[in-house]
């Protein structure tokens, strides 16, 4: 079976983490990675022990909820709290970072930001990332990766493909047979 790609693996972590969000406006998750190891995660929500938007409602001032700490900031603060260096690390986040998070990401030494969805992509944030030499890549998350049926079908197809290849059939016959089987699995 084909293994999940690193960018999809870490993006899946960020999507899972976003399910802990207590923001009623947008659920965001972030994962900080260094050397293919997760060093911190965060989701958007209130301060530890504070009132949550899900319980008390949003505290909106000038169009922004000031009760909420953004996912990226929570992940960076987790690194600060537990002494994990973010220099040259990568950030995987479910949505494009806001300007304030962009500045914190740059100051923390993050070298690459991977995001799954566009969200109010501010031109100034894009400009700051470019000026700082932070690589920004959109990596749409493939939700099928976590679908048990898709995984099962992929494993079945991989097993069948290996068996067909072991029979040393002519290429045209192997291709036709595998295409026929795959169409029935879908």
Image (cartoon, helix red, strand yellow):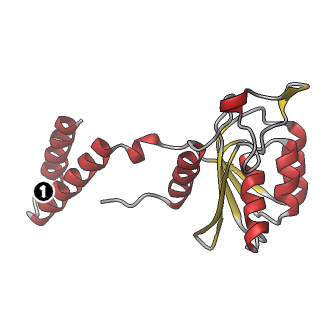
Q: Residue at x 77, y 67 (%)?
A: 81
Q: Is residue 121 above or below residue 1?
A: above
Q: Residue at x 73, y 71 (%)?
A: 82
Q: Is residue 186 above or below residue 176?
A: above
Residue 45 position, x and y percent, is 71, 42
Residue 75 position, x and y percent, is 71, 57
Name the side, left or right, on which 169 lies relative to 25. left
Q: Residue at x 71, y 48 (%)?
A: 71
Residue 125 position, x and y percent, is 86, 44
| Secondary structure at numbered mark 1 | loop
Screen quadrant of the C terminus: top left
Examine the image and state in which quarter residue 41 appears: bottom right
Residue 172 position, x and y percent, is 17, 49
Screen quadrant of the N terminus: bottom left
Q: Is residue 43 above or below residue 91?
A: above
Name the side, left or right, on which 177 lies relative to 92. left
Name the side, left or right, on which 130 lies relative to 84. right
Q: Residue at x 16, y 39 (%)?
A: 180
**Residue wearing tag 1:** 170
Mark 1, other Cα within 10 Å: few <14 / some 14–19 / many ≥20: few
């Amino acid at each position: 079976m084909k293994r999940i790609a690193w960018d999809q693996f870490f993006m899946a972590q960020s999507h899972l983490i976003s399910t802990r969000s207590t923001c009623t406006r947008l659920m965001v998750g972030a994962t900080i990675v260094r050397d293919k190891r997760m060093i911190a995660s965060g989701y958007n929500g209130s301060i530890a022990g504070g009132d949550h938007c899900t319980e008390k409602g949003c505290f909106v001032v000038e169009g922004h909820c000031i009760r909420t700490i953004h996912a990226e900031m929570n992940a960076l603060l987790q690194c600060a709290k537990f002494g994990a260096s973010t220099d040259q690390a990568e950030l995987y986040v479910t949505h494009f970072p806001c300007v304030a998070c962009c500045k914190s990401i740059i100051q923390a030494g993050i070298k690459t930001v991977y995001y799954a969805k566009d969200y109010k992509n501010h031109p100034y944030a894009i400009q700051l990332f470019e000026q700082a030499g932070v690589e920004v890549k959109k990596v749409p998350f493939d939700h099928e990766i976590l679908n048990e049926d898709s995984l099962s079908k992929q494993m079945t197809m991989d097993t069948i493909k290996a068996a067909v290849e072991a029979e040393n059939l002519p290429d045209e016959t192997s291709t036709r047979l595998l295409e026929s089987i795959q169409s029935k699995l879908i």
